[in-house]
Amino acid sequence: MIDVLLTDDHVLVRTGIRRLLEDSGQIRVVGEANCGEDGVTLAQQLNPDVILMDVSMPGIGGVEACRRILQRDPGQKIIVLTVHNEQTFPKRLLEIGARGYLTKECGVDDMLLAIKQVYNGGAYIAPSIAQQLALSLLPGNQNNPIDRLSRREFQVMLMISHGLTNAAISEKLCLSPKTVSTYRLRLLEKLGAQNEVDLVKIAVEQGMVEFSSAE
């Protein structure tokens, strides 16, 4: 039996995934978290075999949650399950140490296969994502402005695009407000943006947020 922790801010999504996984008879859902912070806490308390992690959640979000979990336990096996299918997120999360990446358009069989492969020490990337990543490595296809950002700049950019203030970002990332302001200025310079509205537009264009998140 494979013990799985679900981290997603939508209760209906978690309920549906739980039923699908447990109906297989091979997986047991040992916990559910509705935000990144709770995901980090439960990962430490429950020590699941595999974590299914959403990206866009309240609080620190899935990217920072993955980083904190893997910083504490590099051997933890995380599969990202999200609506985001642009290459920006897969590259960042795989660099952090996630073992798998699925979109919520995947079928049950794909999800079960991913969990089993990752549990057994392998990795699994949805075919459409793997193709995007492969194409991004070809000459002439490496012009994504987001790729020029450092890990911390990317995190700050993501939080800005979700409307968080300097104070909120400072608290969630354990940075001083002055440091957060410095990151904001760096983002404007690196991305050629005039203001935060421009940053949000870029985030939407690059698939970092859904249109509804930027309104």
Image: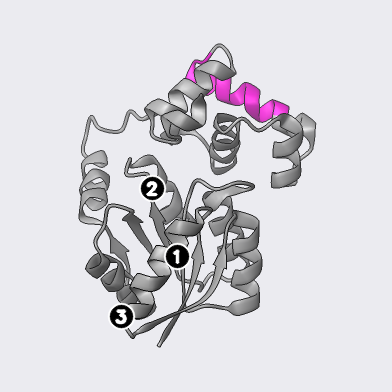
Q: Secondary structure at mark 2?
A: helix
Residue at image mark 3 = 24
Would residue 152 appear left or right of 17 to someone viewing this image? right
Q: How many marks?
A: 3
**Residue 109 pos. (x, y %):** 23, 69
Residue at image mark 1 = 15
Q: Are circles 1 and 3 on residues that touch, CB within 8 Å? A: no
In this rendering, does residue 30 appear at all?
yes
Q: Secondary structure at mark 1?
A: helix
What are the residue bounds of the magenta stretch?
181-193
In this rendering, does residue 53 appear at all?
no
**Residue 181 pos. (x, y %):** 71, 26
Does the magenta-highlighted stretch encompass residue 191?
A: yes
Q: Secondary structure at mark 3?
A: loop
Q: Are circles 3 and 2 on residues that touch, CB within 8 Å? A: no
Q: Residues within 10 Å of mark 1 (few under 14, many from 20)?
A: few
Q: Residue at x 32, y 44 (%)?
A: 85
Q: Residue at x 50, y 53 (%)?
A: 10
Quarter where residue 100 is shown: bottom left
Q: Is 25 above or below relative to 77? A: below
Identified by mark 1, the residue type is Thr
Quarter where residue 135 is shown: top left
> Which tag, 1 or 3, sits closer to the chain's start?
1
Identified by mark 2, the residue type is Lys
**Residue 49 pos. (x, y %):** 47, 79
Residue at image mark 2 = 91
Does the magenta-highlighted stretch encompass residue 24?
A: no
User: For the view shown, which residue lies furthest in the top direction?
Assistant: 194
- Checking the image for residue 173, the label placed there is none
Which secondary structure is most common in the magenta stretch? helix
Identified by mark 3, the residue type is Ser
Mark 3 → mark 2, Cα distance in angstroms: 30 Å
